[in-house]
Image: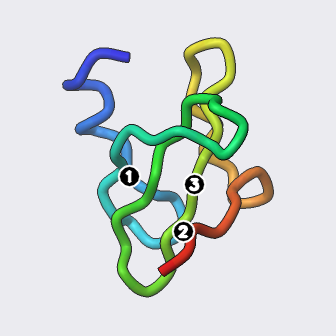
Amino acid sequence: MDPWVRDLLRCPVTGATLVDGVSPAGEPELHSTDPQRPLAYPVREGIPVLLESDARPLPH
């Protein structure tokens, strides 16, 4: 994903910035930078899935 596209995306739950990350299974994700409620969103076939129902909580 182009960096300018990622810069436009925000966590739909908290509005926090999203950064590149990797799931425990080694799959690409976008990680919310919200300190109170960090969430990870999957990236499937290069497309971020920004649905709260598909997000997983990250450890604080």
Position of the N terminus, as image quadrant, is top left
Give the number of the disc on residue 54.
none
User: On the image, which quarter does residue 7 sit in?
Assistant: top left
Do the CB atoms of the residues marked 3 and 1 lie less than 8 Å apart?
Answer: no
Give the number of the disc on residue 10.
1
Residue at left 56%, top 15%? Answer: 46
Along the viewing direction, whichever of 12 and 25 lies nearer the viewer: 25
Q: How packed is label 1: few (under 14 Cα within 10 Å), some, or many (20 or more)?
A: some
Residue at mark 2: 13
Residue 23 in the figure: left or right of residue 18: right
Residue 44 in the figure: left or right of residue 36: right
Residue at left 76%, top 51%? Answer: 54
Q: Which element type, helix, strand or loop, lies under badge 1?
A: loop
User: On the image, which quarter does residue 47 sit in?
Assistant: top right
Does residue 31 lie above or below 5 as drawn? Answer: below
Q: At label 3, which amino acid type do we have?
A: Ala
Residue at left 64%, top 69%? Answer: 57
Tell which circle, 3 or 2, labels the residue nearer the N-terminal end: 2
The image position of residue 13, as x and y in percent, is: 54, 68
Separation of disc 3 and disc 1 at Cα?
12 Å
Residue at left 38%, top 65%? Answer: 15
Along the viewing direction, whichever of 14 and 32 lies nearer the viewer: 32
Q: Which element type, helix, strand or loop, lies under badge 2?
A: loop
Separation of disc 3 and disc 2 at Cα?
11 Å
Q: At label 1, which amino acid type do we have?
A: Arg
User: On the image, which quarter does residue 49 sit in?
Assistant: top right
Residue at mark 3: 40
Q: Which element type, helix, strand or loop, lies under badge 3?
A: strand
